[in-house]
Structure formats: structure tokens, C-alpha cells
Image (cartoon, helix red, strand yellow):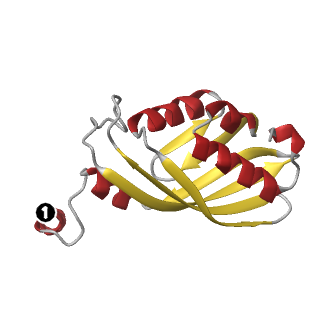
Amino acid sequence: MAASEVIDAATVARAYFEAVGRRDLDAMTGFYEPGGSGEIHGLIELVVPDSYRAWFANLFQAFPDFQFEVLDLMSNDEKAAVRWRARGHFTGRVRFEGMIANGAAVDVQGCDVLWIRNGRIRRNDAYMNGAEMARQLGALPPQGSIGERAATGAINLKTRLRAWIDSRRG
């Protein structure tokens, strides 16, 4: 389904995310109005088509078995909220967010809020637990692990040292 054939927000959102599931960059960018933008909060700001297309092409190369499914969709006149799940293994031949592929399995859920006008996406705000994805990729220690406790202890020590230094200055 082409973006020009659909009008209501729910239909646009569902068709767009079907294109994501197929890893179809042409269809994905075709759903956006020219100059449309998106942000994966805490990770990256994207503009269609350039940075958007490059980032998703890299994602699909880094996770060759990328799977995507819509779990829930709600909409009104010009907005759609889509709760989703993405899975895959970091086995590609490209880096993802600076990391070399390590074979890690990733299974994350998130929610996108799409702003749609005249059958085209003009803005997409995506939210997911970036810390959980980083843990799954091995970029952060597992929750509750010795590594996490050590990192928290180091942060607390730094905070106490800064407070002690500030108290000595005053």
C-alpha cells in the first residue's frame, strides 16, 4: 500500500510498521512527508530521507534477522501510538552505535507516537528502554550484577568526593 493511498492515522501507522517489518526502506521513507523527522529518544534524531534511511539501513545490516511486530495500536485524527516489539541478533558485518557485532540477542519493546497529516507521517517520537537494549548488547552490565553494583558504587563515590571537595571550598 502506498502512502498516497491511505488517509487515516491508524491505516498509515499500520502500513508504515508493516514496511518496517519487511525492512523496506523505500516504503518506510515513502510514508513520510518531505523533511519529516523522528527521534528515538535518548539515542538519535533523524530527518527523512537522509539520516533516517542511513540509520535504519545500518540497523538492518547489523541485525540481519531483524523481526518486528506491532503489539498494539491506538489512534485519533492525526496521531497514532504504536506499541511494538523488535528482536534480532547482532551478527551483521557493520557496527551498530559504534559497537562491533558480538552475536548478542536483542529483544526490546517500545512505543512510537506518530504525527500524521494528509496520509503522511510528519513526526515520529519513539520511546524504548535504551539501558535494557545496552544490557542485552553487553554495553552495560546486567541489572543486579556485581558489575552494576560496582558502577553504582563508583558513581556514589564520585558524588561524595565532589560534595566533600565543595564543602572544603566553602
x, y (%) of residue 23?
Answer: 57, 38
Identify the image quadrant of the C terminus.
Answer: bottom left
Pick the quarter of the image with the N terminus.
Answer: top right
Answer above or below: position of 47 versus 116. Answer: above
* Residue 168 in sight here: no
Q: Which residue is mark 1?
A: 147
Amino acid type at image mark 1: Gly
Among the 4 quarters of the image, the one containing residue 46: top right
Write the residue at 11% across / 68% down: 146
Residue 19 lies in what quarter of the image?
top right
Q: Residue 24 appears at what percent x and percent y?
A: 62, 35
**Where 77 sits versus 28, above or below?**
below
- Asked if residue 148 lies left or right of residue 40, the reply is left
Q: Position of residue 91 (x, y in %)?
A: 32, 38
> Which residue does the image show at 30% across and 56% down from the upper left?
136
Decide: few, some or many residues near mark 1? Use Cα within 10 Å; few <14, some 14-19, many ≥20: few
In the picture shown, does residue 78 fall above or below 66? Answer: below
Q: Position of residue 126 (x, y in %)?
A: 57, 54
